[in-house]
Amino acid sequence: MDWRDFGHRMAGMAQDLLAQGSVETTLERITGSATELVDGCDASGILLLDHGRARSLAPSCPLVEELDRLQHRLGRGPCFGAARHGVEERVFRIPDLTPHEPRWPDFVSAAQALGVGSMMGFLLFTEDESFGALNIYSRRPGAFSEISEAAGIMLASHAAVALSSARTHAQMQEAVASRHRIGEAMGILMAGRHLTEQQAFDVIRRYSQETNTKLREVARLICERGSL
């Protein structure tokens, strides 16, 4: 594939991603696109670290999940490192997996036994947040070129935006739910103690400060118990 053809195909992929209806389908389309757009790619997936545990998102085949589990079990590996420490090195590339790789010898030996010949990992990040890594595998050693790496970087940037959008949406939903619960708790206090709206909120806030409990948790207690 030459650079001109690569540019046209990436533009088409970007338009296709915009047409997806959810974050899940967007991520699935990203990892699915890897086999179409990244020269040499046989499999791909997204490794996300969530409170120290590895999660496989949109794996293109069972091999990807097996490799993610392997890195999590070992506690190290190129993609695990990209997800955890990616600010130092945003792209990992192992042109030829051999048992002599000094950085991740246990992982590389096991991955080679599973039939992986070469691999790349790309940090998923936005301006101030790191999420994980987009991982791309080939069964052939030396399968990836400069164009392969450029395609991986582009796909990783789209995946990072999709994950950022999902996180923002979840935070907004949580904020709306918290406001609703606090309002419900205030209503319970106003009715039960004959308080004004401000007085009810002050009761919740004071209890929150005195017990070092988040406002939404105080509100949940009031709604469950009918009082404090």
Image (cartoon, rainbow, N blue to C red):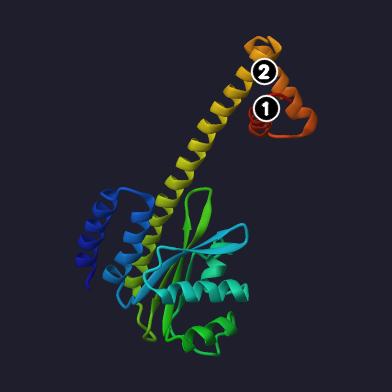
At horizontal 68% and vertical 34% (from top left) the residue drawn is 214
Residue 160 vs residue 8: left or right? Answer: right
Measured from the top left, where is residue 169 in percent x and y?
Answer: 45, 41
Residue at image mark 2: 189
Q: Amino acid at mark 1?
A: Ile
Q: Secondary structure at mark 2?
A: helix
Q: Under tag 1, what secondary structure?
A: helix
Type of amino acid at the residue the image marks with label 2: Leu
The residue at which mark 1 appears reads as 222
Label drawn at residue 52:
none
* The N terminus lies in quadrant: bottom left
Q: Is residue 68 above or below residue 130?
A: below
- Across and down, in percent, residue 215 comes to 66, 30
Q: Residue at x 55, y 76 (%)?
A: 70
Return the x and y of residue 101 as percentages of the image width and height.
Answer: 55, 85
The quarter of the rendered structure image containing the C terminus is top right
Taking the view exactly as shown, the residue that stands out farthest to the right is 210
Question: Residue 178's spot in the image, x, y percent?
Answer: 57, 31
